[in-house]
Image: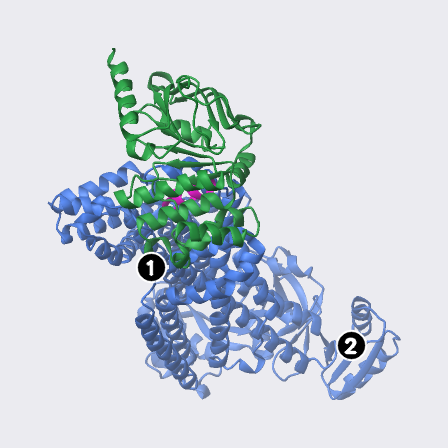
Chain colours: A blue, B green
Amino acid sequence: MAAGAAGALLAETRRRPGRLLLTGLAITVATVFAAGTLLFGETLRSYLGATSVETPDTVAAVVMPDRLPEDARADLDGRVSSVDGVAQAVELRELYPTVGGAGAATTWRVTSDPMTGPLTRLSAPPVRGTLPAGLDEVAVGEGTAKRTDLAPGDTVTLSAGAGAPQTVTVTAVVPLDDGGLNSLVTTPDAMSALGGFLEQVDVAADPGVDPAELAARISAALGAPDAARTGSEQRAAELADGSASVSAVLVGVGVFAALALVAASVIVASTFRIVLTQRRTQMALLRCVGARRGQVVRAVLAEAVVTGLVAGALGVGLALLAGYGLVAAMRASGMQDVPGLVVWWAGLAGVLVVAVLATVLAALAPALAAARIPPVAALGVADASDAGTPRAGRRIAVAAVLAVAAGGLAALALGVARTSDELAMLVVAGSGIVAFGALIVIGPVLVRGLVAVAGRPIAAIGGASGRLAVANAAQVPRRTAATISVLALGVGLTSALLVGVSSVRAGAEQNIAEMFPTDVVVATGDAEGAAALAARLAADPRLTVRADGPAVFVDPAPGVAEDEAREAVEQGASGAPGALVQYAGDVRDQVEETLAIAQLIGFGLVGMTALVAVVGVGVTLTLSVTERTRETGLLRAVGLSRRGVRSMVAWEAALTGAGAAVVGAVLGAVYGALGMQVLGLATSLSLPILTLTGLVVGVVVVAALAAMAPAVRAGRVPPIRALQEA
Amino acid sequence: MTGPLPPGADLRAPSRHLRPAIRAVDLVKVHGRGDAAVRALDGVDLAVPAARFTAIMGPSGSGKSTLLHLLAGLDNATSGQVLLGDTELGACSDAQLTALRRDRIGFVFQAFNLLPQLTAAQNIELPARLAGRRPDRAWRDTLVGLLGIGDRLTHRPTQLSGGQQQRVAVARALLGRPEVVFADEPTGNLDTASGHELLHLLRTSVRELGQTVVMVTHDPVAASFADEVVLLRDGRVAGSVPDPRPDSVLSALSALSGARAGI
């Protein structure tokens, strides 16, 4: 019999599939995000896994210096070379110096390479020039050469640690997979002299020697049982390392995907409540003809399963389409090394299951409410759903408990911050989730306050339409509150991000100001060199110069443009060996660039929740408009113009948006500040008031835009509908 | 203005001698198209005199509701004209019709007259607010006193009885001193006592305030409160009953049914 009740409801769903899509739209958006994350993550994992294996196949064994005592790391290559079965042993060193002389001074990567023989990591002979051999010779990666215009014969200065900058000559341009980081390659001896950090020792074996045996023999010779492992073990470890960093990123992105899904669930719960109330008579009729409460609940949940399946499958399908489309588009635009899409079907199936579960969970409370509809309601007229005054007392009590819990967690986070940043951030996130819960519970009560506060100005600006919109919002406090909470979640995440970015920027500004008392700082080997250079630079009238120890501080003279001063400094310092010129502006640009990328990624992550929220505004209003068809007809009959109806819907959305924007911006700013405090960045805490105000205005506008489709729909309601049965 | 009708008034040309508040000229309304087309109104000519209470009656399917919709500017005619004063409704744009309904016409429907999210007072003042006008408070208070809903103004519709809701709707309809008030089965959802009270109020508005009222009903007793009953059959005007009483209306109706039966 349950099938009978479910069948009756599902028949209705089949009759109006559009409504099912509308109910599930928020789930679809969240699923696109979750499935897209999975596709992107798996593709990146396989791609990075493949590229993170750096040890070549010719390496039979490697020695890991970090497994040897520090005093046993000298002359490792010599000692390993003398082990029986070793054809060659080469030290691999790495250094990240500040490089001057090729544009602005930035941090580069310098690695060692034997240049020839079985252990070289260079995949091909030099593109130009000859391979470096001497202690002051380097090769530059092909990509780096392209970015910096370095060519064989040029010189650059390397400055690492406390030592004086060293000048080296570029002798070759070599093919190198540098991952976008400017890179130099030099010989192991030169790297030794530069003080490069010993990463590992690559070992080539004599023909016929077993790698495992060789590794064991090397370990024994070095006196440490696990100092060496085979090349294949090393490559496997590198693969795992590469994937691990992706996994960490995926966990982070997954948190945001989960947030988007939570937001979608709140929307779905709200839409189910509306749709079920509209079908109140139908539900009551089912009860009239003998359906038990349990059967009604099961019937509604069956519909939720179908909704979740359809919406989820649509989301997964869209994500796949977007993934394949993106790869194809990138390849078409000439990016040939874009990896193929890696589709993990089991994972996608998991996303679909989660989407269905979220929908069913969201539908549970509305289903139970639907089961409570008395059979006699079959004879009555449907009321507006979510109507009536909320039970304020209970809601306030529960919300207060949750708010106290959120506050307690926040305090705990501040306490934990001394021991672990990660743990503290987790506690902050937990506190945020509890605060969101409090917002959902208190929402319907807040709506009354919102209406009281915002009602007057909206009526003043929006006239009769505005007044009606406020009345509409107040009539269904639960629905309005659900939309507001979800939108506030999106706004809150965004504003927390804005506070974070703004604080990090302020902190970076402080650091730059401390590091750069003047616009330009030139580091030289010693005080005499500095004094000489200062004297030379001071001769230029365009510069103000001061020498202090081994450094020269330079400012443009009053009225001199930055570009001109830079030219003057470069001219003056070009003859000084080992001078490293650094510009505050360049460092500032670099910080800005990094922040811009971080901000972009952040907006991408929180944007999904925001998108779900905006979809929620649109869907909820569309259902409200359908529900209010007769009321709209009556308004049209007594003289509200079509435009008036449209602006009434838009005003309701704007009111929702305003409530959400203010609540979200405040909560987000508080949590952003809390996060900064926990991370110890509170000294530079900065509230971007202007940006936050822009956010609030933007949210109101976006909410009103989301109301466009339902507004047009409401405008089409003919006045005669007021006289027809609902 | 409300003098008795001359005896032996022409049944086929009701009340042409009075200045009409609203007129229908050869009004035709076809619902649907092709095989499914239904001719709901088939050439209706009608002049509703001002400051009179006119009832429109007829069997179900006679087109009385359709006629009301067209007269009130709620729907568009297939052909023919509706003239409210000198304004032809068919020539009006949607925006003009909206303003016309708001400023020159009042409505009382059978049910669902009031917006549930507004109080009684807000519902009464709604058309004025929609027009961006300050409602005439003195006139409102007069109406509210007349209708006996003075202590119900801050209530929402769900807190009012059916009769109170209808009286609020009447107050809303009368507040703008419209040229015509249209009532569509206004007593359909009321008990007998509340229904009679409402009909008395409508008649009072005609007698004492000079209001023009057009009411569609299927109840001969309700129709007997009118000054004149216009009879509709098969989408045409089939006659009228001046100075109606329940029994005269009933006999006119049964005569109509008889005529349809082919006598």
Q: Residues within 10 Å of mark 2 (few under 14, many from 20)?
A: some
> How far apart are labels 2 and 1 at the CA level?
82 Å
Q: Is residue A166 left or right of residue B92?
A: right
- Quarter of the figure that contains the C terminus of chain A: top left
Q: Which mark is residue A388?
A: 1
A100 falls in the magenta region:
no
Circles 2 and 1 on the same subunit: yes
Please provide percent x and percent y for residue A131.
61, 63
Q: Are marks 2 and 1 in contact (CB under 8 Å)?
A: no
In which quadrant of the rendered view does residue A471 lie? bottom left
The residue singled out by tag 2 in the image is A576
Q: Is residue A509 left or right of residue B15?
A: right
The part of the chain drawn in magenta is: A626-636
Amino acid type at mark 2: Ala
Chain under label 2? Answer: A
The answer to whether residue A176 of the structure is visible from this angle is no
A632 falls in the magenta region:
yes
* Predominant SS along the magenta part: helix
Please provide percent x and percent y for residue B52.
45, 32
In which quadrant of the rendered view does residue B120 lie? bottom left
Q: Residues within 10 Å of mark 1 (few under 14, many from 20)?
A: few
Per the image, label 1 sits on a secondary structure element best described as: loop
Image vertical order of residue B63 relative to residue B128, above or below: above
